[in-house]
Amino acid sequence: MIRMVRFYIRLIKTPQAALLLFTAMAGYRSAGGNLGLLEIMIAMLGLLFAISGTTALNMVFDRDIDVVMERTRNRPIPTGMISPKGAFIFGSVLILVGMSGNYWVSLLYANVVLAGVFFDLAVYTLWLKRRSPWSIVFGGMAGAMPILAGRTLALGYIDWVGILLALAILLWIPSHILTLAMNHSRDYKLAGVPTFPNVFGFENARYFMAVSNLAAAGVMLAVFLWLNVSVSGIVVLLLGSLFLLGFSLRNILHPSEKTNFALFKYVSLYMAGAMLILIL
């Protein structure tokens, strides 16, 4: 029983789900929300369930790709530990339960979360992932919805700060995705997935990530200034942004799997740090 629970937990990519939930909390705190504890808990759990259910359904839809790729062939569905039907039911129930809670708390908040589910499942996974190297843009839009949802939950409406925060996440995501795509390019070729690096070349992908990181840092700084974040918070963000650009330039000037993986690790640390400043 415990073993099966572990397999189902592996369906939801807990580190990814936790990071997205963290961005939602940062969005909420950035607006100084004053909802009751029960409403906040239901909203965050609802978002977590929606994210987790979406990830589980993605694994169902991508099971033919996962079985081909070395990086993903040991996931629960390709190994036969969980059936596609079981995973589909699991993911669907999570989304339904999560969205029910979200709609109970706030109609607008729930609609933003639902937009993220739609972009991830329908637009990214089912439509564009196997057709276009630009699918990362729409995957990024899905990843940007939690922080927008969190701020919307606090305000009761969508504002420009929320949109800019979502844009910062959207601009951050290419480095998170493309570094993996580069280090596993052979896998993606075998699976027939047209990733940006395989279509446009690794050098162009490195420049694209550097420009995207520069833009993400700029947008995040603009948000911090707009929100009157403390001087110490802005200094930390600036130092983190300098390191981000340093990692990006190093990846261009000294390209290797090692520098690529270092950038992959740092971009997550950078965004988590920026979110922590907003929360505090």
Image (tube, rainbow, N blue to C red):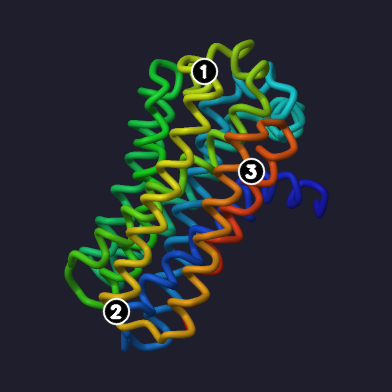
User: Which residue is under mark 2?
Assistant: 227
Q: Which dot, 3 or 2, sits closer to the camera?
A: 2
How many C-alpha atoms fall within 10 Å of the one at disc 3: few (<14), some, or many (≥20)?
A: many
- Label at residue 201: 1
Residue at the location (35% across, 73% down)? Answer: 224
Q: Relative to 29, is 141 above or below?
A: above
**Type of the residue with mark 3:** Leu
**Type of the residue with mark 2:** Leu
For the residue pair 26 and 240, the one nearer the viewer reads as 240
Q: Mark 3 or mark 2, which has the lower sequence index?
A: 3
Q: Relative to 200, is 265 above or below?
A: below
**Type of the residue with mark 1:** Gly
x and y percentages locating residue 210 in the rendered image: 47, 41
x and y percentages locating residue 45 in the rendered image: 48, 67
Residue at the location (44% across, 72% down)? Answer: 25
Q: Mark 2 or mark 1, which has the lower sequence index?
A: 1
Tell me the CA gap for discs 3 and 1. 31 Å
- Label at residue 8: none
